[in-house]
Image (spheres, coloured by chain):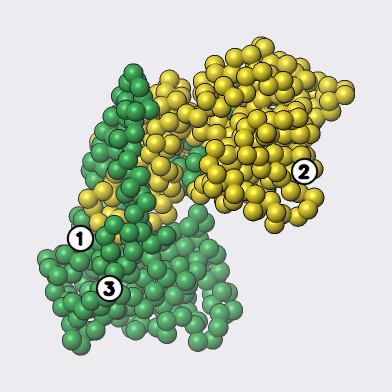
Chain colours: A yellow, B green
Amino acid sequence: MDVAVLGLGLIGGSVLQALAAAGHRAVGFDADPATRATARTAAAQARSGARWQVAGTIRDALRDTDVCVLAVPFPALPAVLTDLAGYPGLVTDVTSIKEPVRELTGDLRYVGGHPMAGKETSGFRAADRGLFVGCAWVLCLEPDTDTADWLDLAGLITALGARVVPATAAEHDRAVAGISHVPHLLAAALTGVIEGNPLAASLAAGSFRDGTRVAATRPELIAAMCGGNADAVGAALDQVLETLQALRTELSAPDPVAALRPLLAPASAARAAWPPVPGDQTELPARKDVLLRLGRVGGWVTDVDRESRKVIAMRPESGRNSS
Amino acid sequence: MDVAVLGLGLIGGSVLQALAAAGHRAVGFDADPATRATARTAAAQARSGARWQVAGTIRDALRDTDVCVLAVPFPALPAVLTDLAGYPGLVTDVTSIKEPVRELTGDLRYVGGHPMAGKETSGFRAADRGLFVGCAWVLCLEPDTDTADWLDLAGLITALGARVVPATAAEHDRAVAGISHVPHLLAAALTGVIEGNPLAASLAAGSFRDGTRVAATRPELIAAMCGGNADAVGAALDQVLETLQALRTELSAPDPVAALRPLLAPASAARAAWPPVPGDQTELPARKDVLLRLGRVGGWVTDVDRESRKVIAMRPESGRNSS
């Protein structure tokens, strides 16, 4: 396929390189001239069969492409979408919130996407064509989504090594509120325990390091992510706060050790059973209801047969983890 | 020195092996015969200069030793301390709470200790003689601590590669409540976001994995740790809850992105500046007030000169991290 990638940060740059490595014609663009230069230099050094192109304008990047991947930060999307007006191809994105993007895309042939991949580092220099191998990549299915478009994108993405997870934008936003956005707020709050306490900072080890890792993310990114999904993040945070308040109450019980234990047991079992083990492969008809049900039980698509309108799907085995 | 180590789990086993490797006569004991057998077999396979012994009784382990390291879980301490009655040597421990242990040690020559080292795995088979290299190891200083005893232990421990951090038991318990105990409660609460939500479990990636890692710890261990330090953990959790409530409020603000950002900035800066960079070495007199002040500013002891009653100390450089 011929694919344009707009925005060449960590995710966009990785998508560009992965698509080129998978044999597609991949053309990137970034608003920053220095990033374009970096991406061009890297392309010249890539293996000849896996070279991407870098265009000087959005218009040049889009020319003769079938698919456009929007990989700019959420605040930059409205301006880029203006440039896409009238684009006849398929449009997807990699933004970490899906309902707000859906509201911006108007009449475009849009299928929302979100690869659950990331790194501490950012920018094209950190890009990695293997970033998506084994990662979950949500592709949104809505009442107005064209299933054939969805299957085209699912085929493109499974070929990069990702597990394609079908979900509605609303389901996605609720799920990531809990597993991705709230962890950033907990990490920020936990970091407070070393502020003004050098002794605590010098004793802090593994449980502090891991519990606060994502707190070092730039505050404007955490604010954009959580604030852009505020309702779902608020609901997920309320659930976590309710558990923490219950634990706080038991810390004041006459025998806190005995009182805390039953509250902690379910989480210990749930964490030990995560991540889930893949179960058997099954073939499923590529119908919206079937695909969405697959996503809701924790399953994903590993391959697509566009002709027969079937997908190869995996469901997790219950009660076991894969670590 | 001649050192007995009682309790041969991950920490006790690692202490035993590290002491033997450092040239001390190290004798271990564990109440579990299978653990003793494992430790004996491993000793026979160790390099000849670094072999530890395994005694069949506590009495045999203690015979002719200068130091006894208590490495049993906190609930097992009262019984073991009964067996130590009249022991003339120096007693230390590795328990993660210090005031409650201090209250149990009566007339023994006791100096509380806590190596800030750990692993996901447990038991003697997971023991590692290099576990303490670079780790912070608190050694408690109280009004009734004999400074010469403290220096003897500090010398023993710095030789294992650890940074010895002087602190009172109360200071230690407050610090670890925030950096070690509360993270376990946050991890348990966060794990709840995947319970009953297979879609969320299948999308969960790095920030969930790291934020919940320690939730898989056995619930009775988390309960014992947090419940045994309930007052300090309650106070630290209150501080974290206050921050989370403030973040929750801003999620409902008219512009949550703008409202969240200033609340997140200090944590991002604090986490980016952690862990602190070691500054210059200095020589300090081994006086209690000097040592405790060193611990309070985030410093530690790297070496001990017992004759001149001096220590080599490091202080963190402010405003930079070492990662």
Q: Chain of mark 3?
A: B
Estimate the spatial distance between the alpha carbons at disc 2 and disc 3, rounded to whole Å: 52 Å
In the foreground, A167 or A7: A7
Label 2 secondary element? loop
Give the residue number, with chain letter if any, for mark 1: B296
Estimate the spatial distance between the alpha carbons at disc 2 and disc 1, rounded to whole Å: 56 Å
Q: Specify whether disc 2 shares its chain with disc 1.
A: no
**Proximity of marks 1 and 3: CB atoms separated by less than 8 Å:** no
Q: Is residue B275 above or below residue A115?
A: below
Q: Specify whether disc 1 shares its chain with disc 3.
A: yes
Name the disc covering residue B245, or none. none
Instruction: Rate crowding at label 1 as few (under 14), some (14 to 19) or many (20 or more) other CA atoms within 10 Å.
Output: some
Q: Is residue B21 above or below residue A242?
A: below
Residue placed at 29% from the left, 38% from the top?
B240
Residue A49: image x %, image y %?
80, 50
Quarter of the image for residue B98 reads bottom left
Residue B141: image x %, image y %?
19, 66
Residue B5: image x %, image y %?
39, 71
Instruction: Identify which amino acid the numbered label 2 is placed on.
Output: Ala
Residue placed at 76% from the left, 55% from the top?
A47
Give the residue number, with chain letter if any, for mark 3: B280
Label 1 secondary element? helix
Estimate the spatial distance between the alpha carbons at disc 1 and disc 3, rounded to whole Å: 17 Å
Q: Chain of mark 2?
A: A
Give the residue number, with chain letter if any, for mark 2: A22
Relative horizontal placement of residue B283, taking residue B206 as reference (left or right): left
